[in-house]
Image: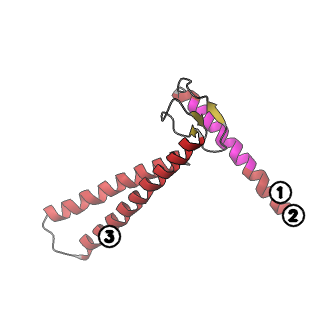
Amino acid sequence: MTAFLLRLRFALSTSTLFWLGLLALLNALQSSQSWTKTCVAFVMFVHVVAVCVLIARVSHKQRKERSAGYTTLRAEEKTLEQRDPYVGRRIRGPGEDYLSSASLREALRAARDESRRISGRAEGAEEKK
């Protein structure tokens, strides 16, 4: 979950920079105070608020993971156990070397497939009732 939130935060931050650049361009072109500038400023404000919320959320999630003795991030803390973010299965023990990119991708793919299979079974079981 933390890794997903970090990717979402990165995407929103990038989008916010785009809107900021567009607003700066409109100002540099000395366009009149129009609905376009107002809309861009509003969209940028919404993105900034979302990024701030995600920063707080990610920090909270990371603290919870640390206090539980694990992390879901790739290269966070070597002293913590690394678990996959899908089903929470252990993929690296505390103090062990970080996984290579290929090994990590394979472990995450297997966990994601297992998660989908489990949730598919749960949904199928509910439909039968």
User: Circle 2 is placed at which residue position?
Assistant: 129
Q: What residue type is labelled 3?
A: Phe
The answer to if 124 sits in the magenta stretch is no
Q: Kindly report the distance in space between the C-alpha atoms of the residues bearing marks 1 and 2.
A: 7 Å
User: Circle 1 is placed at which residue position?
Assistant: 125
Up/down of 96 relative to 46, above or below: above
From the image, which quarter does the C terminus lie in? Answer: bottom right
Choose between 99 and 97: the one closer to the eye: 97
Tell me the crowding category of disc 2: few under 14, some 14 to 19, or many 20 or more residues within 10 angstroms, Cα based: few
User: Circle 3 is placed at which residue position?
Assistant: 42
The residue depicted at 51 percent of the width and 35 percent of the height is 74
Up/down of 82 relative to 98, above or below: below
Chain part drawn in magenta:
104-118
Q: Kindly report the distance in space between the C-alpha atoms of the residues bearing marks 2 and 3.
A: 48 Å
Mark 1 and mark 3 in contact? Answer it, CB < 8 Å: no
Quick one: SS at disc 1? helix
Badge count: 3
Quick one: SS at disc 2? loop
The residue depicted at 51 percent of the width and 46 percent of the height is 63
> Mark 1 or mark 3, which has the lower sequence index?
3
The residue depicted at 51 percent of the width and 45 percent of the height is 3
Which secondary structure dominates the residues rendered in magenta? helix
> Mark 2 or mark 3, which has the lower sequence index?
3
Mark 1 and mark 2 in contact? Answer it, CB < 8 Å: yes
Colour style of the rendered protein structure: secondary structure
The residue depicted at 30 percent of the width and 54 percent of the height is 17
